[in-house]
Image (tube, helix red, strand yellow):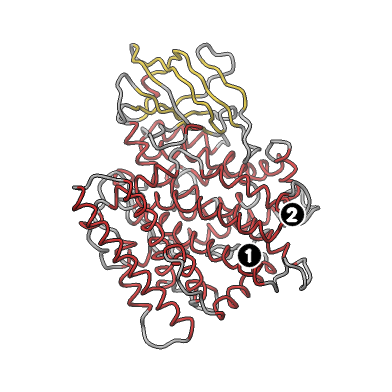
Amino acid sequence: MAADTTPGHGYAQTAETGVQERIARLEHGFGDLDDPGNPLGAEQFVRADGERRMLPAAEQLLEDFGFNAEFVPEELGGRLRRLDALVRVMRTVFRRDAALGLGYGMSTYLAAVVVWSGGSVHQRRRTADLLLSGGRMACAYPQPAEGNDFLHNGFTAVPDGDGYLLSGRKEALNNAARAASLLLFARVGRSGPDAHSAFLIDTPQSGTPGFRLLPRRSTTGIRGCLVHGLEFTRYRVSDRELLGAEPDGAELAARAFPVTRAAGPSMALGCADTALRTAVAFARSHRSRSRASLRMPRTRAALLDAFSDLLMCDALALVATRAVHLLPRESATLSAVVKYLLPMFLTETLYDLSIVLGAESYARQGAYAAFQKSVRDLPMIGLGPVGSEASRAAIAAHLLRLPALRGPDSGPAGAALFQPFEPGLPDVRPWEFTLPAEGDSLVGGLEASVEHARAPGGGELERALAGYADALGTELDRLRHDCAALVSRRGGRPEPRVYALADRYSLIAAGAACLGVWRHHTASGDDLLAGPAWAVMALARVLRRLDPATPRPPRLGEEQLLSELVDRFDDARSYDLYATLIGR
């Protein structure tokens, strides 16, 4: 993910074709999720989840596919160049089983991304060889004060000759029992947030002196994942296993967070996609007089709200994953917004959809059991090295600088931020992730999108979009005024009020992402993104969270999005920006 040169347009287009072909191969390999006779169908994944294991046939499919190559940069022999492309491939797995997505894929990538950005040539080569041969990794990031105690990290490393003595426990680590390599962060002789160092070690064998694999932890969701604790007692590691210099751990973790915060929740959209598809299947199976029928206003509203939220979440995730390449200094804030907002939105979406399914939303077997599995899995995906509160704190810190930040630069980079299939992205520059942002391109560019939406002409939906865009611009003006007043009054020091402003900023950023994707969509034809209906519906959802008095969208927008919802169900296409063919 950090090659020396940026490929030309022809190479980039070829690479995008390769991404689409790999997704199609995976989808074909997994087959029809709803087919009870499919050995890789939903029924089989639900059964494996009930037995607290991953489905062996699914792991074999990924092994035969060489799935780990998706996490290895191209210059090291893998297939990784664009973060947004990696996310799209991973959604194919998360649509089937979040435990498979985390256990086979995301946990390994969480460790590998630190090696790619901070490891030596030897460490990068060794890690690439491990992954390309099918090996797995596990990681124990340092946990900030705002983090989750369930994931608490307490390792220390005491210098000892030409190495260190590692001690401490990690209570819950996914893949610990199956990983060939561990990435650990430990405090080295000092206190304070900058005292961590990172170590890349081979996983000790069972019975090795100074090491103990703790019993498997039971989890409510992602039950197929092997979650164990680790305990080290004066376990010796050599100085060659130090990643970077001492104590560079905090810097290395900070370089990884923009990537992992943006990617993880975006991958989880695959899980929410399956939940929505299950709810649509339930509604389609009921007669018109049933309360769950698509003819009933409550059912239609729940399904449309869920579809609108998925599109909005994907627009925000798209911006954050592409900003890793295009706006590295701003990606820390954008990824924090994704990490904070998406788990909350998706969890609320599943709760609302449960009203459609009624008692079937609790089913642990049968045609609709995949829904209950998604309900249990999604909150677990929201856990991670940096939790929601830590992300909210990062957004709050950004807001204290917001009045002084400039707007976006003009040029093609602005449009590239919002284009789902545009392959021409520059290489990742991880050393810039920790540098202060000079601007706020997403929110700062909202004014231009509002002006674009005000263009004369158009029909009912275009007028509604212009009105919603104006309302979003007004919300941004209010936010800027409140941020300036807060900074002036408190001298830039945080206070509880700034966290309420962080909530408002996150919603405005989500609305700006939707407007940006609508404005810069370049594909021709009659696909959903070419029209205003989806943007109208998504912005209505955002604005009603900011102001409950926001008027409902035109009935025409609801009708067009409902038609798209049903068409995608019938055609087996995903409910995100990409409308990917599923199981074909």
Q: Nearer the viewer, residue 494 or 569?
A: 494
Q: Which residue is mark 1?
A: 573
Q: Residues within 10 Å of mark 2 (few under 14, many from 20)?
A: some
Q: Tag 1: residue type?
A: Arg
Q: Is residue 189 above or below residue 455?
A: above
Q: Quadrant of the C terminus?
A: bottom right
Q: Tag 2: residue type?
A: Glu
Q: Quadrant of residue 411?
A: bottom left
Q: Residues within 10 Å of mark 1 (few under 14, many from 20)?
A: some
Residue 244's x, y, as percent? 33, 30
Q: Which residue is mark 2?
A: 360
Residue contact between numbered discs 2 and 1, judged by CB atoms under 8 Å: no
Residue 137's x, y, as percent? 52, 33
Q: Which residue is at 45% across, 38% downward?
A: 385
Q: Which residue is at 21% across, 48% downward?
A: 490
Q: Mark 2 or mark 1: which comes first in sequence? A: 2
